[in-house]
Amino acid sequence: QFIVLTKDTDADSGMVQRKTEVSGTAVGGPWEVRFQEGRGAPEKVLWTELKSYAESPVPGIRYFSGTATYSCRFTAERKECMALDLGRVCEMARVFLNGNDLGLLWKAPYRTDVTDALIDGENVLEIRVTNSWMNRLIGDEQPGVTERITYTSKKFYSPDDELAPAGLLGPVRLIELK
């Protein structure tokens, strides 16, 4: 979060009250994950729990680089002040709730205010996660690869390099704040 001062002031300091977490509930499952076209991954998968792409037995997912869209539906009771905490994200995420764009989250904590977008009852959550291209570069170096997805002027990785965690790792939680 940023504080922007637009006018001169005589005040010596300003204090921003930090809200505290009252309660939290898990969000998710099943997650429909749609992968960006042309990046080697299947069009979509259905996951009951969040995990790193690097853990997938499917090479197209394990070495995926690009933007994947996670979608789920959940039921909630709207309170006075609500936030959505994405937990761990590798690397950045754009959040949409019930069609409302809640912005880009690019660093921890991956948390955004959902008070105005959340409705009593069923809600539709969409999270677009973009990861780095490291795993894809490692994937393109694997033995037997006949069609590369990425190209660089220099070889940065070898086939046996360790993959980085990638995607939405969670846990995703809906939080009431006071």
Image (cartoon, rainbow, N blue to C red):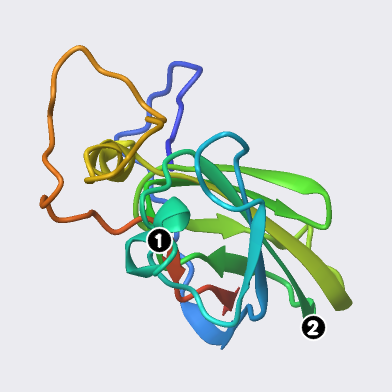
Q: Tag 1's secondary structure?
A: helix
Task: Name the image quarter holding the N terminus.
Answer: top left
| Residue 117 in view (yes/no) | yes
User: Where's residue 107, x and y in %?
Assistant: 35, 47
- Amino acid type, residue under disc 2 in the picture: Glu
Relative to residue 47, is residue 69 depicted above or below?
above
- Amino acid type, residue under disc 1 in the picture: Tyr
Residue at the (12%, 29%) spot, across then down: 156
**Mark toward the start of the polypeptide (1 vs 2):** 1
User: Where's residue 127, x and y in %?
Assistant: 62, 54
| Residue 178 in view (yes/no) | no
Residue closest to the far top: 153
Relative to residue 64, is residue 31 depicted above or below?
below
Residue at the (42%, 23%) spot, across then down: 9
Q: Along the horizontal axis of the image, is 95 left or right of 161?
A: right
Q: Along the horizontal axis of the image, is 43 left or right of 3?
A: right
Q: Which mark is residue 53?
A: 1
Relative to residue 148, is residue 15 depicted above or below?
below
Residue at the (33%, 36%) spot, across then down: 133
Question: Could you tell me if the residues under marks 1 and 2 are in contact, i.e. CB atoms within 8 Å?
Answer: no
Task: Name the image quarter holding the C terminus.
Answer: bottom right
Of 121 and 169, which appears nearest the observer?
Answer: 169
Relative to residue 139, is residue 165 depicted above or below?
below
Q: Along the horizontal axis of the image, is 24 left or right of 154?
A: right
Q: Which mark is residue 95?
A: none
For discs 1 and 2, the disc positioned in front in the rendered view: 1
* Tally of numbered discs: 2
Where residue 163 sits, quadrant-wise, is: bottom left
Mark 2 lies on residue: 77
Q: Tag 2's secondary structure?
A: loop
